[in-house]
Amino acid sequence: MSTRDRKSSPRTRSAPSAPAPTPTPPGQGERRHNRPLREGLDELLSHTRDIARRAKKMTPEELDYAQQRLEWLADEVWRVATGEATPPE
């Protein structure tokens, strides 16, 4: 069987590729429409990266607080993303 025959075989054909995403004009992306969500995600990522860098050097108390803050930030991001009201304090 030649290389050409293999390429035309239905078993070796690859699925058609998805169309390339259309570029959005500057200032029209999700970052501009939902600033509270973007800010919450940025803070969550920043905290996560900080924990990843310092975890081996952190005391058990610092790790506990970092985990609590991580959970709180994740809850805040979830509330903003789903449109839920913030819990009463």
Image (cartoon, rainbow, N blue to C red):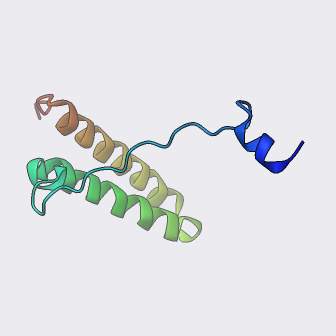
Which one is nearer the viewer's eye here, 85 or 59? Answer: 85
32 on left or right of 73: left
- Residue at position x 53%, y 57% from top? 60
Find residue 43 and report its horizontal and vertical position in percent: 27, 59
The quadrant of the rendering that contains the N terminus is top right
Residue at 34 percent across and 64 percent down: it is: 46
How many callouts does the rendering have?
Answer: 0
* Residue 62 locus on image (x, y percent): 44, 60
Tell which residue pokes out farthest to the right in this image. 1
Residue 37 place in picture, x, y as percent? 19, 47
Identify which residue, 10 or 21, lies in the foreground: 10
Residue 81 placement, left or right of 26: right
- The image quarter containing residue 84 is top left
Q: Is residue 48 left or right of residue 23?
A: right
Q: Name the residue nearer the viewer: 41 or 47.
A: 41
For image coordinates 36% across by 43% down, the residue present is 71
In the figure, 77 relative to 46: above or below? above
Residue 83, by quadrant, is: top left
Residue 33 at x, y percent in the picture? 9, 48
Q: Residue at x 52, y 39 (%)?
A: 16
Name the foreground residue: 39 vs 70: 39
The quadrant of the image that shows the C terminus is top left
